Amino acid sequence: MERNPLRRQLQMMRKSFFDQGYLDDQFVQLEELQDEANPNFVEEVVTLYYRDSSRLILSIEQALERKPFDFNKLDAYMHQFKGSSSSIGAKKVKAESTLFREYCKSGNKEGCMRCFQQLKKEYATLRKKLEAYFQLARQAGPMETACRPK
Amino acid sequence: MNFSCGRGAMSITSSSAAWKPADAVADQFPAGLRVLVVDDDPTCLMILEKMLRTCLYEVTKCNRAETALSILRENKNGFDVVISDVHMPDMDGFKLLEHIGLEMDLPVIMMSADDGKHVVMKGVTHGACDYLIKPVRIEALKNIWQHVVRKRKNEWKEFEQSGSVEEGDRQLKQSEDADYSSSANEGNWRGSKKRKDDEEETDERDDTSTLKKPRVVWSVELHQQFVAAVNQLGIDKAVPKKILEMMNVPGLTRENVASHLQKYRLYLRRLSGVSQHQSNLNPPFISPQGATFGPLSSLNGLDLQALAATGQLPTQSLARLQAAGLGRPTAKSSIPMTLVDQRNTFSFENPKLRFGGQQQQHMNNKQQINLLHGIPTNMEPKQLDNLQHSGQSIGNMNMQVASHGAQNNQNNSLLMQMGQPQSRGQVLGDTTVSQSPGHPSSMGQPILSNGMAANFASRNGIPENIGGPSYNTVSQASSTLNLPLNFPMNHASELPGNSFPLESTPGISSFSSKGVFQDVSSEIKGSVGFMLGYDIFNDLNQHKTQSWELQNVGMTFDAPQHSSSLQDDLHIMQSVSVQQGSTVQMNGHNRSAAIASKAMFSAGDIKEHGNAQNVNQHLNNLVDNARRVKSERIYDTSPANLFPDHFGQEDLMSALLKQQDGIGPTENEFDFDG
């Protein structure tokens, strides 16, 4: 079937996400929630995540530019961001968030800023990857998206 | 939801009403469980909703705490469990937790990406029945129904317990075993959820069959009738007998009414505790300092002592305490009462149940006292070893305390002592717990002990932290504890210690088990289960040393320490206490009276940050205050054994004394807002 190659491609793509550490098991949880009633559940959640978290990213950016530096506030934002990111299984993003919070706790402004840049990169990279993945999934047909990890 | 039901599949086994839980579970419950999810993060909210739906629960989501509260208020019985995030923009999750506990008494599960021990502890102390770390997995949600069942069971148990004084042992036993047990057998619980417990419960219940009495289901109508009768009579004058007459419900016994009244009072206290939080909560504990303390002290002392003695309240004790706190028959009675009655009850001499007066309670107490009698002995020796009996002792203690006349002041001292830095906090929680049951009236009283006892108990074996941080939360939560423990106040009936109509005991018991107190260091906030003393403690709050916010008293029982049984109890207590705790707000408000029951919580209030000692001190203070017991007494007895001089006794004493004044008019405190 013509889907096969797509499906295969999709599966490989998906596997790479896990292998490369972009996603963790929480993503699988999301996939498992997807069903007939919500055939695009994962995509919807990820979309919602990016929409909502972009707001947070902006707030953090603004806070980073403010003087004096408010570590507490930054930490609070990042806590939220981390919660969201972890709930979709964004592994690398989550790791950066954790690191960022560490810097906040130790009052390391430089560390925070550097870390944040890295975080934004990971965040954007993941977004692109997932967008491509969902697109492919749509092409491959609903079945694909519901693939379960082997 | 169809829990109830019938599950045909339920194997309603042979045991009389006991269904085999497994079957029941397999049945439809928990499908249909009505869950309210609160989280400001839309992503998480969406995921949770989907997960919960997958578990076949009925989900309502909202992204603001305020919205959640109004939804809950509008649909009082529309939900079974609430899941809430900790960090929310409009209201702190713990605050929401308190509110819910107070107003709706629903099990609340906290959630957060933050898995730091302190935060989790806070959850415990505030009475959360569980804490989930984000990201939440569906497996974690599958079992949340257990909290609902557990809570129901406990509630029923309370009812039952209060009604049936059967042997204290039984109660203790029951309490330990199961919150569920009682409900299981009983039959109609509010929700079939109870059936779940069935497994163990049934077993347990069979054992305690003697204890079981035909359960009365307090339906909405029945409760309304009850409330109407109470209001007509006047909350202060509402005695079971009269209420029963007014209600005129065939088949309803005075005992049923009495136990329900106890609960109701706790509830009122809790409510008023919250409102009064600021006001003088001076828990009646202060009063105990004076004479009243005597009797109470004994009771409390017992607890304390027990706690102190054991220092490590064996889980058992904690369990007992919990049971007591939870309102298990054993514990319940004693704890709430003691505190309540500070004024009068304190004096053991006259067992009047200050606590809560009701004669019923008195009766209950008496009966319970008996239970305690056996136990107190243990305590006296200031060996908390007895406490080890675990929850039992706590329960006993309470009872004992309740039995004012019965015990010796030592008990009080114990309690007080317990409050002391004993092992830091452990016992504290416990002690208070135990206390309350007996003397509702002594609000300020022994609650502390209970809590303390609880602490002690918990201390013994319990991981201190439990006590600690929990306390803090407890304090917050403890406000709820202010449950109408006070009620006893009205009736100076002699609650022989047993009669702690601590409705709030639930919370109290939790104290005990919770090592919460243990952590005294952290914050004894009310969590100590000072439910009893919430008020008292509140008043006591004056202590500068540590702001014991009893509020949380009892709430945070984190019983992790002990034995599983305790844990369960604690758990329940937690939930219970949460409610109670919040009201309790023992911040030294005058609620002390109400504190009686709260007293237990007061311990919780004691927000000690950091040192158990403080907590203890507070506890002591609270207890003292509540009790008006001779403070000396309290301290004296214990010091040797129970509390090393960690606490500046003097400070405590003075604090207490100060409180006392505040607490003095505890009677008024109990104005149940009900």
Image: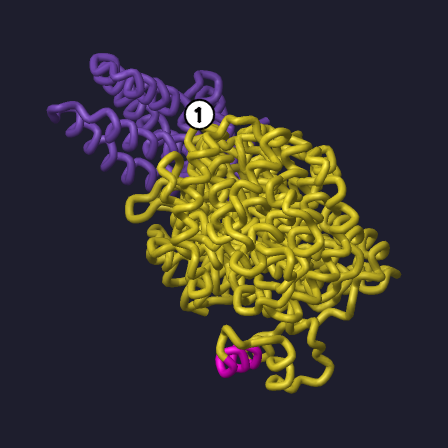
Chain colours: A purple, B yellow
What residue is rendered at 48% in x and 17% in y? A19
Q: Secondary structure at mark 1?
A: loop
Query: Residue A70 vs residue B440: left or right?
Result: left
Magenta stretch? B225-233
Q: Is B114 in front, or is A35?
A: B114
Looking at the image, can residue B92 be seen?
Answer: yes
Q: Is B247 in front, or is B495?
A: B495
Is B148 situated above or below B420? below
What residue is rendered at 55% in x and 67% in y? B264
Q: Main secondary structure of the magenta part?
A: helix
Is B32 situated above or below B237? above
Q: Quadrant of residue B226?
A: bottom right
Q: Is residue B232 magenta?
A: yes
Q: Quadrant of residue B155?
A: bottom right
- The x and y percentages for residue B610 are 43, 28
| Residue that badge 1 annotates | A23
